[in-house]
Image (cartoon, rainbow, N blue to C red):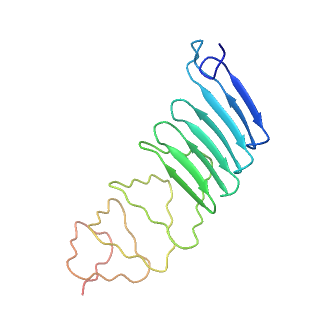
Amino acid sequence: EANEDNSYTLTVSTHDKHITIRTNKNDGEPFAYTIQLNTKTGFFTLTDDVGNYILLDSEKTRIRLENKDKTFVDLNRKSIFGEAIEDITWKCKNFSVDAARTINMKTINFNNKSTNYKLNSNSIEYTGTAVLNGNWRVNGNSHVSGNSYEGSSSGPNNRE
């Protein structure tokens, strides 16, 4: 006897306002899928039986992609959220970030490898220990409060 457990189904319901397609794994298929267009609530979903899904929620202005490992990208109204338990990698020719207010980064190690590095800021506040390897040149005024330790210098040394 044909039922949802052993047959692919297509349901079109103008009463419940949805179109649903379901597959199953009755004949050895590795995954089962459900595709639903729900015009009553204004969303579209594509899911499989292991926890991966795509959601388009028109009413809430949301698009979410998530896999069974809980890695996701969520376009939620005017914000984008994302999470990966392991890595996020972007590869491109040019990468720009234009944040109107703030960029916050929190990590254990921060590595930046660049041929040229330019920083343009009205002020810089640094807390911690700085180790400078290589040449260091100051154009303009430099002031050191506290102890300054010198290894070697090829230029004039002004101490207060």
Instruction: Note whether 138 is above or below 40 in the view shown.
Output: below
In this view, the residue in front, 43 or 110, is: 43
Q: Residue at x 58, y 72 (%)?
A: 100
- Can I make out residue 89 in this image? no
Q: Residue at x 29, y 66 (%)?
A: 130
Q: Residue at x 34, y 73 (%)?
A: 126
In this view, the residue in front, 115 or 88, is: 88
Split into 4 quadrants, where in the image is the N terminus?
top right
Instruction: Note whether 134 is above or below 121 in the view shown.
Output: above
In this view, the residue in front, 141 or 75, is: 75
- Can I make out residue 108 in this image? yes
Split into 4 quadrants, where in the image is the C terminus?
bottom left
Q: Residue at x 28, y 82 (%)?
A: 158
Residue 73 picture location, percent across and down: 56, 48
Counting labels gives 0
Residue 113 picture location, percent across and down: 45, 52
Question: Which image quadrant is residue 30 in?
Answer: top right
Residue 84 picture location, percent across and down: 46, 45
- In the visual, does 150 lie left or right of 62? left
Residue that lies at the very extreme toward the bottom in this rendered image: 160
